[in-house]
C-alpha cells in the first residue's frame, strides 16, 4: 500500500512539473518582442495614418501612405518628409488646400492610399488606393497613373493590399469588398461580407485578372519567397489564406494559419516567413493590463514563430523588418511610425 502511495505521489509531482514547464521549446516559438518602448518617426503637422511602410530598391525611405491622400518620403533629419506621390484627383480636387473636415470625409475625393510596394527593378511604386484603385508612381515621384479601377466587370470599391513579383513584375492586390467602401470598413466585419477579391495586374499587358472572388475581407497580401503562392490576410475571420499561383495546385486556395487577432498587412520577414500586423486581439478587453499582441511572425508553412506585444493604444497595420534588427510599424490611426528594436 505504501509503495502504491509513493508511485501515485511521483505521478502527481511529474504532472505538476510538466504543467509548469515552459512550452516555448515545444512550440518552436522564440521570445516575444516588447514594443512598449518604440522609437517614433513623427509625421509632419496634423497628418495621421501611415498605414503602409515601404523602402525602395536602394534602401531609401521610408515611404508611407497617409490620411490626406498622399504618399510621403522620409529624406532624413535634414530633409524631413516630402510629398512623393498622389492620385490625379488630389490635384483636380484641390486637396492640398487647408480643410477643417476630418480626413475620412475627403477620402473619396482625395484618395486614401493603403498598401505600398516597390518593384525594385524599375523603381516603380505600386499603390493600392482604397478609392482610386491600383496606381503606379515612377521612381521620381509625382502624379500617379491609375492602372485599374475595375476587375471582372465590377468596380474596385475597397482596394487594400499589394505586393509585387520582383521577377515578372506582376502585381497582386486585394479588393476587400465590392459592397462596402473603406469608410464603411466596420460593416465588412460586422456583416461577414464575403465579396472580396484577389487579383493580378500584368504589367506587360496592362490587364487585370480576378484570381479568386467571394473572399471574406481580404486585406494584406504577400508573395512567398519561392514565388509559388500568395499569403492573404483575412481580417474578419482572423486567418491567413494561401493561394497557389504556380505548381500543381495553381489556381486553388487553402487555409494557411489561424491568428489570435485581426490581421492587416502581411510582409516577408526575410527568413522565408511573414510578419502579420494585428489591429487588435480576438478577445481583447478594454480594461486590465495595458498590453496586447500587435504583430505575429508566421513561418513558411503557417507555424507561429514569434509574438510582438505593445500598449493597447498601438494598433499597427503593418510590420516591416529591415536589416539591423529594426521593425517598422505602420498604423492607420497614429501620427507616427514606430521603430522597434529586436
Image (tube, helix red, strand yellow):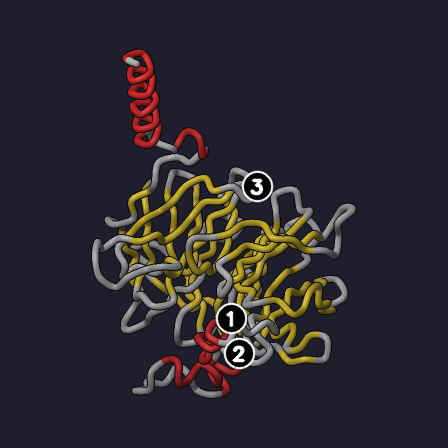
User: Mark 1 vs mark 2: which is more N-terminal?
Assistant: 2
Q: Is residue 174 visible?
A: yes
Q: Nearer the viewer, residue 212 or 323?
A: 212
Judged from this view, the residue extending furthest toward the top is 3
Q: Gap between marks 3 and 1, in whole Å?
A: 37 Å
Relative to 342, does residue 99 appear above or below in the rendering?
below
Q: Of the residues under marks 3 and 2, which one precedes in the sequence?
A: 2
Q: From the viewer's perspective, tell me whether residue 125 is left or right of residue 32.
A: right
| Residue occupying the point 31% across, 11% down | 3
Question: Residue at label 2?
Answer: 131
The location of residue 90, given as percent across then percent down, is 48, 81
Q: Is residue 307 left or right of residue 254?
A: left
Q: Residues within 10 Å of mark 2 (few under 14, many from 20)?
A: many
Instruction: Give the number of the mark in front: 3 or 2.
Output: 3
Position of residue 216 measured from the top left corner of the image (x, y, whole percent): 57, 67
Residue with the mark numbered 3: 300
308 up-or-down from 212: above or below: above
**Mark 3 falls on what kind of element?**
loop
Q: Circle 1 sits on which residue? A: 142
Q: Position of residue 152 (x, y in %)?
A: 72, 75
Within 10 Å of the Cα at label 1, are there few (<14), some (14-19), or many (20+) other Cα atoms? some
Dot 1: what SS? strand
Q: Residue at x 59, y 53 (%)?
A: 231
Amino acid at each position: 500500500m505504501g509503495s502504491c502511495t509513493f508511485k501515485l505521489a511521483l505521478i502527481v509531482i511529474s504532472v505538476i512539473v510538466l504543467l509548469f514547464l515552459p512550452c516555448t521549446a515545444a512550440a518552436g516559438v522564440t521570445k516575444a518582442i516588447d514594443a512598449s518602448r518604440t522609437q517614433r518617426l513623427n509625421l509632419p503637422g496634423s497628418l495621421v495614418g501611415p498605414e503602409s511602410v515601404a523602402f525602395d530598391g536602394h534602401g531609401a525611405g521610408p515611404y508611407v501612405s497617409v490620411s490626406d491622400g498622399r504618399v510621403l518620403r522620409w529624406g532624413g533629419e535634414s530633409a524631413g518628409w516630402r510629398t512623393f506621390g498622389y492620385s490625379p484627383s488630389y490635384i483636380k480636387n484641390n486637396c492640398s488646400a487647408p480643410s477643417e473636415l476630418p480626413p475620412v470625409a475627403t477620402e473619396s475625393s482625395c484618395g486614401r492610399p493603403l498598401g505600398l510596394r516597390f518593384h525594385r527593378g524599375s523603381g516603380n511604386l505600386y499603390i493600392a488606393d482604397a478609392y482610386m484603385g491600383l496606381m503606379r508612381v515612377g521612381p521620381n515621384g509625382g502624379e500617379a497613373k491609375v492602372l485599374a479601377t475595375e476587375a471582372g466587370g465590377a468596380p474596385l470599391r475597397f482596394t487594400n493590399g499589394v505586393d509585387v513579383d520582383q521577377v515578372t513584375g506582376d502585381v497582386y492586390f486585394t479588393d476587400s469588398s465590392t459592397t462596402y467602401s473603406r469608410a464603411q470598413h466596420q460593416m465588412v466585419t460586422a456583416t461577414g461580407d464575403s465579396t472580396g477579391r484577389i487579383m493580378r495586374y500584368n504589367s506587360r499587358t496592362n490587364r487585370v485578372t480576378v484570381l479568386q472572388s467571394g473572399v471574406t475581407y481580404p486585406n494584406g497580401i504577400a508573395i512567398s519567397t519561392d514565388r509559388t503562392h500568395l499569403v492573404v490576410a483575412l481580417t474578419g475571420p482572423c486567418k491567413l489564406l494561401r493561394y497557389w499561383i504556380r505548381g500543381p495546385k495553381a489556381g486553388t486556395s487553402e487555409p494557411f494559419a489561424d491568428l489570435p487577432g485581426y490581421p492587416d498587412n502581411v510582409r516577408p520577414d526575410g527568413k522565408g516567413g511573414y510578419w502579420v500586423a494585428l489591429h487588435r486581439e480576438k478577445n481583447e478587453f478594454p480594461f486590465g493590463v495595458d498590453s496586447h499582441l500587435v504583430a505575429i511572425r508566421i513561418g513558411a508553412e503557417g507555424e507561429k514563430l514569434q509574438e510582438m506585444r505593445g500598449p493597447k493604444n498601438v494598433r499597427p497595420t503593418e510590420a516591416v523588418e529591415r536589416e539591423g534588427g529594426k521593425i517598422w510599424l505602420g498604423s492607420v490611426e497614429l501620427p507616427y511610425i514606430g521603430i522597434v528594436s529586436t
